[in-house]
Image (cartoon, rainbow, N blue to C red):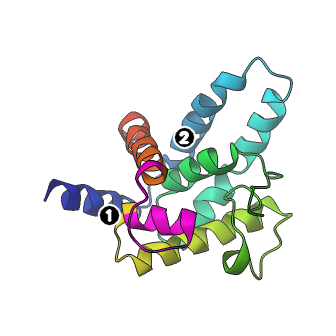
Amino acid sequence: MKKMILILTLMLAAFVVRADDADELRAYITDFMRPISKTRVYKKRLAAALNLVPVVIEHSKAQKIDPLLVAVIISYESSWDFTAVGKLGERGLMQTHGRAARGFDMTDPAQQIAAGCAHLARALRDCQGDLSGALSRYGTGGECRPVARFVKWRLQAYQRAVRRYRK
């Protein structure tokens, strides 16, 4: 019962348009990037990520997904590196490939976010709003059955981000 209430609460949060979404995302991205702050690429990566905040908000709201959830997925999938390529050929910020990336220009960060948001929205619909199942389907392309470690890390990161950055 508690799990169902948590899932419904998280889903309802996606439908509320809030003025401080951009502030939340900027704070989350800045904190996420902090461990690489001593590296050469920090300022460039942080600036690029912060410039994508309006794009994340636009595409996530268009798909009725919480922008903070999209930011968490981007953080885990590519660490805000739009040139990232995965082991199985996944590309871009949200590491989409195959059918999910079809019709999108995967060299454009805005299109990468659009493709990922569309894929995540499809996964949420297919899993009847179950966030754990949708994260599993998003990452594996399989069933709406949570893959323990994969889903656990992303779900916990999202829950921490909601507690920390939601006012």
Instruction: Give the residue pinned by disc 2.
Output: 23
Magenta segment, which residues?
133-149
| Of residues 79 and 137, the one drawn nearer to the viewer in this rendering | 137
Quarter-of-image position of residue 146: bottom left
The three-letter code of the residue at mark 2 reads: Asp
Residue shown at the point (64%, 24%) measured from the top left: 34
Query: The residue tagged with tag 2: helix, strand or loop?
Result: helix
Residue at x-position 46% and y-position 44%? 153
Q: Which mark is residue 12?
A: 1
Instruction: Name the residue type under label 1.
Output: Leu
Task: Indicate the position of residue 25 as horizontal and vertical percent values.
Answer: 56, 43
C-alpha distance separating marks 1 and 2: 20 Å
Q: Quadrant of residue 139?
A: bottom right
In this figure, what is the number of numbered marks?
Answer: 2
Q: Secondary structure at mark 1?
A: helix
Precedes in sequence: disc 1 or disc 2? 1
Left or right relative to 48: residue 18: left
Left or right: residue 8 versus residue 29 is left
